[in-house]
Image (cartoon, rainbow, N blue to C red):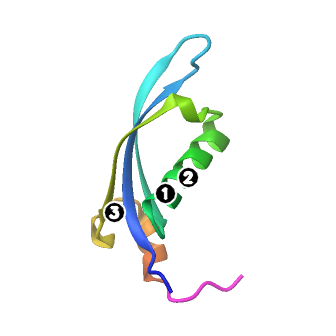
Amino acid sequence: MSEIKTYVIRAIVTFNASHYPMKQKVVKYVRALNEKQALEYLYSYLGSKNKVKRYNIKIEEIKEIPVEEAKDKTVRDLAKLNKIIM
């Protein structure tokens, strides 16, 4: 079974591309099995929360980091769990 890793994704996102384009830097901490899944999560997250199209997201960096370096408390707390019961 694969181990879940923690990734930091840095990107530049263009909001309101049709009317008044505004670029903004985004840093997102993600737990995923590999870089491809982490990137897919970022696309779906920004698309659902901010209605940003994939072609308006320019990825600068995807880097695997230790869990202790994650600044997002939710990501750190999820890493501590052994089992999730729904």
Which quadrant would residue 17 be assigned to in this image? top right
Q: Nearer the viewer, mark 2 or mark 3?
A: 2
Q: Residue furthest right?
A: 86
Residue labelled with disc 2: 40
Q: Check disc 1 and report its element: helix, strand or loop.
A: helix
Mark 1 Cα within 10 Å, few/some/many (few <14, many 20+)? few
Spatial CA distance of label 2 from label 3 is 19 Å
Tell me the amino acid under the disc marked 2. Answer: Glu
Q: Earlier in the sequence, mark 2 or mark 3?
A: 2
Q: Is residue 27 left or right of residue 53?
A: left
Residue labelled with disc 3: 70
Q: Nearer the viewer, residue 69 or 35?
A: 35
Numbered-mark total: 3
Q: Nearer the viewer, mark 3 or mark 1?
A: 1
From which residue to which does the magenta span run? 82-86
Residue 17 part of the magenta segment: no
Spatial CA distance of label 3 from label 1 is 19 Å
Say if 42 sits above or below 77 in the image. Answer: above
Q: Check disc 2 and report its element: helix, strand or loop.
A: helix
Q: Check disc 3 and report its element: helix, strand or loop.
A: loop
